[in-house]
Amino acid sequence: MAVGESAHYWQSPKLPDVDLLRARYIDKTFTRHTHETYVIAAISEGVEAFHHGGSVHYAGPGALALINPDTMHTGHAGVPEGWRYSVLYPAPQLIADIAAETTTIRGAPGFVSPVADDPVAARHVQEIHRAAEEGNALAADSLMRVLVARLLRQHGGPLPRRAARTAGALHAQRARAVLEERIADPPSLEELAKELGTSPFALLRAYRSEYGMPPHAWLTDARVHRARALLDNGVPPAEAATAVGFTDQAHLTRHFGRVVGVPPGAYQRGRARTYKTR
């Protein structure tokens, strides 16, 4: 991590359906990746820039970056001094439950814009972090529900339904299933295309169109997700690395930091830690 940078990723037992990250980044670059959760990131200093939906977006103090699950995006500094933020990663079921109780959204709920200028909501994110750190379950849970309800009412709507499957999209879907099954020892692009009855270039185009990144980039992202699940179950980082197809722990650490924002060991410790009132 560069001089002047810091990051703390954790899960509080008082808020079990939400992961939390507080970080100060200057030179940090997040590669193309996805999350299985929603992302609610409140910027307090500097500017974060990120690719999302074919464009580059910028979020400064008082704004939030809002990312839906399984949505490809990146992240980097939008100004030389970098950015500081507090992030919430709520589970999809939590968002769905709050949406059903507090909104009229039909279908899977989501955020309609990747950036929201909403200082009130940004302050709520900070307050949730403080409550979780202090072990104040009532405050953390209450503020979380107030925040999500506000964001869904003001910046939310139903997630778009997938378009009808084309032949290329079906090839991409089948290719993904093969890569998921053989994540530690995947076939080459040529072998994969031959197995699916298409050409390598056609498969590349279809996969990028369907998932926002080519197969090799998607595979790295998927390996990080699989490694996170192993870390959550107490598997040591070195074992998790080889289990998902990385050559060693250093290889996992390099890619893990570009997706999660912290090394795998720090992630595992933060997820297992119990916070006491300070």
Image: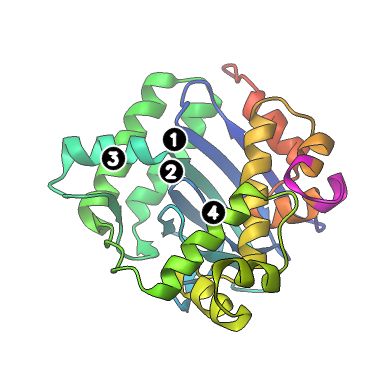
The alpha-carbon separation of the residues under discs 1 and 4 comes to: 37 Å
The quarter in which the C terminus is drawn is: top right
Where disc 3 sits, the SS reads helix
In the image, what residue type sits under mark 1? Ile
**Residue designated by label 3:** 96
Residue 128: numbered disc: 1
Q: Is residue 118 shown above or below 101?
A: below
Residue 73 percent coordinates (x, y)? 53, 65
Residue with the most extreme top position: 276
The residue at 54%/39% (across/down) is 20
Quadrant housing residue 241: top right
Describe residue 254's horizontal placement relative to residue 260 as left or right: right
Nearer to me, 53 or 215: 215
Q: Could you tell me if the residues under marks 1 and 2 are in contact, i.e. CB atoms within 8 Å?
A: yes
How packed mark 4 is, by other alpha carbons closer than 10 Å (few <14, some 14-19, many 20 or more), is few
In the image, what residue type sits under mark 3? Ala
The quarter in which the N terminus is drawn is: bottom right
The alpha-carbon separation of the residues under discs 4 and 2 comes to: 36 Å
What residue range appears in magenta?
A: 243-251
Where disc 1 sits, the SS reads helix
The residue at 27%/50% (across/down) is 109
The alpha-carbon separation of the residues under discs 3 and 1 comes to: 19 Å
Q: Is residue 105 shown above or below 97?
A: below
Q: Which of marks 4 and 3 is in front?
A: 4
